[in-house]
Amino acid sequence: MTASADDMPRPVEGAAAPDPAGTSAAPGPATAAAGREVNGAGAVVILIYLGLSLQLLQVGIIPLLPAIGTAIGTVPATTSWLVTGSLLSGAVFLAVLSRLADLVGKKTVVIVSLSLVLAGSLIGCFSTGFAGLLLARVLMGAVLPMLALPEAIASDTMAPQRARTTIGAIHTGTGAGISAGLLLGALAATGHASWRSFFVVGAVASAAGLVAVIVGIRDSDERASGGLDITGAVLLAAGLVGVLLAVTEGPTWGWGSPGVLAAALLGVAVLVGWFLQQRVATHPLISVRHLTNPAVRLPYAITFLAALGIYSALSAITRLAQTPKATGAGYGWSPVQVAWYALPQLLGSVLAFFVIRHLVNRGRHVAALAVGTGLLVVSFALYGPLVAHAGATMAALLIDSMGLAITLAVTQIVILRSVPKAESGIAVGLSVVLYAIGNSVGSAIVASFFSAHTVAATDIPSLGAYQLSLLVTGVAALLALGLCVPLARRVRGDAG
């Protein structure tokens, strides 16, 4: 099929040129030189599984936090560190492992990541106190690179069309993982199973993934030159930890508290220092030239804006569903009833796959991004005024999950087309970093509204708090849609 020239981002200097169909970065030595694909249909299934297991382990613990807190005797603010700790460690793992994958091989780093997740899951199975569980969750943060490395492996080792289809399918798998996480959390929270079942499932899932990757995945021969920029990795990790710590703990510590202000200011300052250091480093973590190229920075910005609404679109809505009806701001659902949200989440992700395959296989990358971000805008337009109605939130979640899967998959495809194969790991890894930061900022915004607007004489968020949260995150989705315009102009000008 002939691609539209308007939707073909121009590779940055030094990157592999796109093929005539405007589909993907040109195959490297692992494919073109050998005249065949390194990975085939079996590897596709494994890469999809890795994306699914990521979200299963990220989402599954959230409904269990109250039960875990009761079991180990911690207050909610302390128990929440089982999520925050995993997020912070995940940022560090991303900063180091994504670049290391470009240097020593992506398969090797995936094996290391899954081994850490397996170790954390086993520790969680047997821990009886907060310290042991926190260590378990910190190690399980190594799963976060699974939002980047499977896509990079597909891009590096498969023919362009199979790579595009696989990346879309991986994001369908992550949607299925969210559904599975909701079901796991709901079942474990009913009293018919222990919260430890989450860690048991994590151990089984990571062990299965580890064996599958060792047996069924082959790596590209492409490697980045130079070594690991230790200084750059430390600066990036420290800056991310500072920023994420500030936005995740701001609602609890207070936005004007010394701890939050210090973490935010130091985090931003360190990230600025990292950017300047990368400009002069002999072997930078990632080339600043790629970061400043519109074909990369615009998809990064779209990823961040889309991620802002993740918390309010799922976590906040499931919290609303479990709020008693008597408060006037909830549906009074049980944890098992909340599991019904897994259905629209899964269905939306599956529908997204067909949209991605239809548009991206025709070179319509910007059009696909416009569809994805447009669906996000529509979903928040439904959420806001209709959030008091459970059926409306089910419909909105289907549209939202569809839009999010399209947006995240296509932004990664565009980024992978615009950087050399030797930098695909860190390039996509940074998109995941922005995804995590956006998600954290969105959750902080929601938490602020929740604490400022409550039902009279309670600490339960009012219906207006949900509506304000959805309005703000909906505006972010609208801005993401707006960024498709300069991206389209950019690629149209390059094609001309």
Image (cartoon, grey):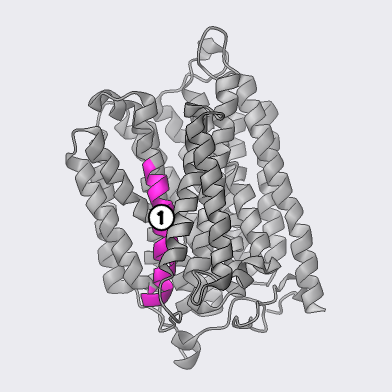
> Residue extending furthest top?
457
The vertical placement of 353 against 314, above or below, is below
> Looking at the rendering, in which quadrant would you find the C terminus?
bottom right
The residue wearing badge 1 is 92
The vertical placement of 157 against 318, above or below, is below
The vertical placement of 356 against 38, above or below, is above
The vertical placement of 370 against 109, above or below, is above
Left/right of residue 199 with respect to residue 79 in the rendered view: left
Quadrant of the rendered image containing residue 206: bottom left
Left/right of residue 208 with respect to residue 385 in the rendered view: left
Residue at left offset 54%, top offset 29%: 447
Of 44 and 292, the residue lying toward us: 292
Residue 442 percent across, percent down from the top left: 57, 39
Left/right of residue 91 with respect to residue 207 in the rendered view: right
Residue at left offset 60%, top offset 37%: 395
Is residue 13 something one can see in this rendering?
A: yes
Q: Residues in magenta? A: 85-105
Left/right of residue 492 with respect to residue 440 in the rendered view: right
Total marks placed: 1
Quadrant of the rendered image containing residue 16: bottom right
Residue 55 percent across, percent down from the top left: 42, 49
Residue 287 percent across, percent down from the top left: 57, 72
Is residue 314 something one can see in this rendering?
A: no
Amino acid, disc 1:
Val
